[in-house]
Amino acid sequence: MDRFEIEGSAPLHGNVRPSGNKNEALPALMACLLTDQEIVFRRMPRIRDVETVVEILRELGAKAEWSNDGESLTICASSVDAAKTNRQLCQKVRASVLLIGPLLARVGRAAIPLPGGDVIGARRIDTHVDGLRALGASIHFDDGLHAAAKKLVGADIYLDEPSVTATENLLIASVLADGTTTLYNAASEPHVVGLCRLLSAMGAKIDGIGTNRLTVHGVSKLSGCEHTIGPDFMETGSFLCLAAASKSKLTIKDVIADDLRFPLRVFQRLGISAELSASDSSPQSSSASSSSSSDLCDLIVDGTQPMKMATDMTGRTATIYSGPWPAFPTDLMSVAITAATQTEGTMIFFEKMFEGRMFFTDKLISMGANIVLCDPHRAVVNGPSPLIGAHMSSPDVRAGMALLIAATVAKGRSTIENVYQIDRGYHAIDKKLEALGAKIKRISP
Ligand code: EPU
């Protein structure tokens, strides 16, 4: 497996452009199974998880072709054979659970291996199963998850938690169902909105997009379309934390302001100053209200300014906690913790969603960070602390990025093994960092 060798503390500056949002791309690819017509994607991130899902679709009978620009992908599932579901490939990506909805809708049956436990914690699929059963699917478990339905029928579904992929699975399953489906307590992350936009462009009738109550009026057929995947706001947040931790000024190009307004409020509490700019000449403060929802703009992060973590109004140590949208995304917790190690003050980080996401902090501690891991969900970070290079392995995609940021900031050389984990979610991250001035090499065995 590839590893990164990083010579830390190199000055960084310049522009960087995030790829398309991984967590929009994966369900969007699965939604291609709903139609026999062609779907053309722009800004499709050519990351490992996407390549794996494309391979799964090919095995099922779909045609997939990347364009020369490496960001456009055309998928055509003119025929689908559910019996060709590749178990080994499915076991590589948790998003394979998203095959159930489209296969049920298109061919009336689906069988996948049970998605395993993840290093970030146990992840239940009860919300998916309850919702699909409410739509009329029969589901049983043995060597995996087996689902069948002659015809899905719309229903009122109260999700027991606003699960991102369960909402997506149920949306994809219900767009071709008979009658109306209402999803209550639905997830509303930008990637869920992106999936709704794609399904609407294919001819689906969805009301309440962007809210936690989605109403789907079933249609009999969907068609092909073109769809641009939104910029990955987790990657944007990662570059923002890189700028802050490395005391650099970076411009993150082609982002969507509305995806960032809530996370930016939290980053402000870490003392990180960032401005959204509609164009180079008309900067707009990150706390100002939005003029446009989905127009692309730039985010300028000035890590050269002094950064101080906020306290509560009474002066007590403050807490940053993760939660379903619009709360702070769990997928930004790891990079935020790394940024906090380079910021003055104290902050409690409370990871409410996953019980395994905080364990990577032991690696930051070994680099010199002053962090107390209180329990699997909470860590107290005292900053700033100088970091020194270390030999590390990447436990999951987001922790991997957080360690990469730490290595870029640290004094001396770091090695990060198991780069596969970072490649799952960040396209050509070594090239992007190199273009900003980082001294990073990818070593292949
Ligand atoms: N959860 C709560 N409270 C809630 C909602 C969820 O505690 O109100 C817990 C769940 O019980 C579960 C965890 O949070 O343990 C995640 O829940 P969810 O079902 O929403 O996660 P998911 O759909 O399996 C997607 C992303 C993850 C991201 C989560 C949360 C995809 C393909 N995956 O997973 O992405 O962390 O939503 O936003 O979209 C990543 O990109 O690194 C990643 C892990």
Image (cartoon, helix red, strand yellow):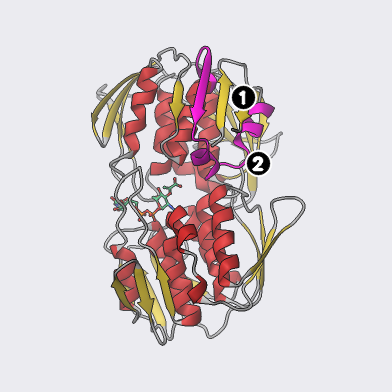
Is 381 rendered above or below residue 206?
above
Magenta residues (range)? 408-435
- Mark yes or no: residue 184 visible: no
Which residue is identified by label 1?
A: 440
Is 174 rendered above or below residue 258?
below
Which quadrant of the figure contains the N terminus? Answer: top right
State the image coordinates of residue 100 (x, y, percent, origin top left). Answer: 43, 70
Name the residue located 44 percent from the left edge and 43 percent from the top edge.
262
Q: Amino acid at mark 2?
A: Ala
Asked whether 132 or 50 is in front, the reply is 50
Q: Residues within 10 Å of mark 1 (few under 14, many from 20)?
A: many
> In which quarter of the view is residue 165 placed?
bottom left
State the image coordinates of residue 61 (x, y, percent, origin top left). Answer: 60, 72
Asked whether 263 or 195 is in front, the reply is 195
Whether residue 421 appears in magenta in the rendering, the answer is: yes
Q: Residues within 10 Å of mark 2 (few under 14, many from 20)?
A: many
Name the residue located 50 percent from the left edge and 55 percent from the top edge.
191
Whether residue 399 appears in magenta in the rendering, the answer is: no
Residue 278 circle label: 2
Which quadrant of the figure contains the C terminus? Answer: top right
> In which quarter of the view is residue 64 placed?
bottom right
Label 1: which secondary element: strand
